[in-house]
Amino acid sequence: MSEQTFVDISHGRIAVSDVNGSKTPLLMLHCNSGCKEMFLFQTQALTGTRRLVSLDLPGHGASSDAIDPRRTYCFGGYAEAVAEVLTKLEIDKVAILGHSLGGHIALDLTARLGNVSGVMIFGTPPIPPGPEGAQLGFLPHPEMAYTGNPTLTDEQIEGVVTMALGPGAERDLFYTSAVRRTDGRARQFMVEAVMAGTQLDQRELVATSSVPLAIVNGADDPVINLDYIDSLRYRDLWTRRPLRLANAGHGPHWQQHHIFNEMLQSFLNSLD
């Protein structure tokens, strides 16, 4: 990956990886309690094809904790922070890849910005605001029970990594450290904001937005309601229906990265 740089914005100091390339830049947004390095396989596969930008959200990875946590640690707050980073990097047109929380942020950015060429999300149910959205989009699962906990046990930390990247990464010390580093308020305040209904209506957004959208989920994702996602109306979905990638859970970009990267490249080529 490229050398890490830092961008100062109103939400805090943001760590950024920026790999030079032609064509429309691709911005990659990681999951809750994750970090930009979770897109290692995508960066390796796409380097040389286009500019690649990944960042650590406020309160994650090498970025600082949020200056004003209540302002930042929600879908809209993260989207504001990412928009500021794009401005600092002088990116005037961008495609976005979003994983789980990163997908929710990507959807918010499609409504917030006028320069998004297309979005691919995975592990992200487009939900309406409030408890209804959480009930529709997510499945009851042990990992979901502590998604919003400010502190996690060692066992729960391993569970987060396993859910995000698959069982093969559960003992990876780097990603375990990334989850442990995450500002616990980022989990707590984000879930509280979702339940309070502060975000935009993402279900309505995907039904009305003209921004091209690709959805590729793991067929064995244990925490999102795939049938709910399939049931939604989409104005500009890349394929006839959301795709399900076999032998993958919440992290198909890691568990089945070769196939996932082919799908990503094909989607990006369709945008170009």
Image: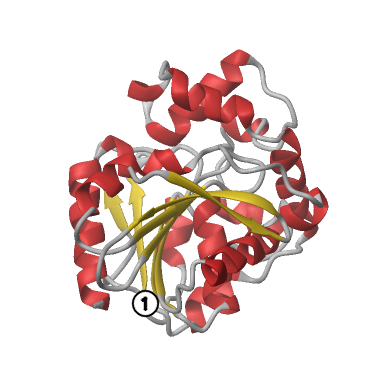
Seen in the picture, residue 48 relative to 145 is either above or below; the reply is below
- Residue 3 lies in what quarter of the image? top left
In the displayed structure, does residue 173 sit left or right of residue 192?
Answer: left
Which residue does the numbered mark 1 point to in the structure image?
212
Residue displayed at 42% across by 16% down: 171
Residue displayed at 44% across by 26% down: 162
Quadrant in which the N terminus is drawn: top left
| Label 1: which secondary element | loop
In the displayed structure, does residue 243 sit left or right of residue 68?
Answer: left
Closer to the camera, 260 or 195?
260
In the displayed structure, does residue 193 sit left or right of residue 200?
Answer: right
- Residue 197 lies in what quarter of the image? bottom right
Amino acid tagged 1? Pro
Closer to the camera, 23 or 100?
23
Q: Residues within 10 Å of mark 1 (few under 14, many from 20)?
A: many
- Is residue 262 visible to the viewer in this orientation of the structure? yes
Closer to the camera, 141 or 116?
116
- Relative image position of residue 85 (x, y in whole percent): 57, 63
- Is residue 99 visible to the viewer in this orientation of the structure? no
Seen in the picture, residue 75 relative to 225 is either above or below; the reply is below
Residue displayed at 65% across by 50% down: 13
- Relative image position of residue 142 (x, y in whole percent): 59, 27
In the displayed structure, does residue 89 sit left or right of residue 82?
Answer: left
